[in-house]
């Protein structure tokens, strides 16, 4: 079982914010929507493009290259051209920071 890794301090991620992180040697994107934190693999399953700068609307992120959208809560691909989900990571908020690990 993979252990949680410290990926950010709470103050680093304001509401609507994001941070590129690495979880278990995988490039990932930590996102905050309201008071909730989500972490997804930072690679579009359609063509391998980083989604770091993709538009975030609610709990949906759009790949900046071809417009594929993903649900950041589940990783599910929501529209073409992506058909495969992105990996998601379990997130825990603790007093000393934000932790993530593979599901």
Image (tube, rainbow, N blue to C red):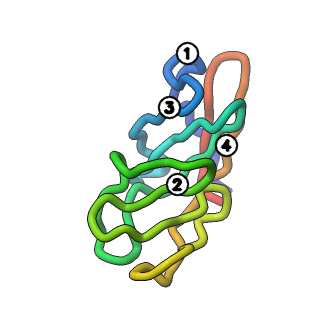
- Among the two numbered marks 4 and 1 on one chain, the one whose residue lies closer to the N terminus: 1
Q: Which residue is mark 2?
A: 40
- Among the two numbered marks 2 and 4 on one chain, the one whose residue lies closer to the N terminus: 2
Q: Are marks 4 and 3 in contact (CB under 8 Å)?
A: no
Observer-nearest of 56 and 35: 56
- Among the two numbered marks 4 and 3 on one chain, the one whose residue lies closer to the N terminus: 3
Q: Which residue is mark 3?
A: 17
Q: Are marks 2 and 3 in contact (CB under 8 Å)?
A: no
Q: Secondary structure at mark 2?
A: strand
Q: Secondary structure at mark 3?
A: loop
Location of residue 31 in the rendering, given as x and y in whole percent from the top left corner: 54, 40
The residue under the point 48% across, 51% down is 24
Observer-nearest of 80 and 103: 80
Q: Which residue is mark 4?
A: 91
Q: Secondary structure at mark 4?
A: strand
Q: Residues within 10 Å of mark 2 (few under 14, many from 20)?
A: many
């Amino acid at each position: 079982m993979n252990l949680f890794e410290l990926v950010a301090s709470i103050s680093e991620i304001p509401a609507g914010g994001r941070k590129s992180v690495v979880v278990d040697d995988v490039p990932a994107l930590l996102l905050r929507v309201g008071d909730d934190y989500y972490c997804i693999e930072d690679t579009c399953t359609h063509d391998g493009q980083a989604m770091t700068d993709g538009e975030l609307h609610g709990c949906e992120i759009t790949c900046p290259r071809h417009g594929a959208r993903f649900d950041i809560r589940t990783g599910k691909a929501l529209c073409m051209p992506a058909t495969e989900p992105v990996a998601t990571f379990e997130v825990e908020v603790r007093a000393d920071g934000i932790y993530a690990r593979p599901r």
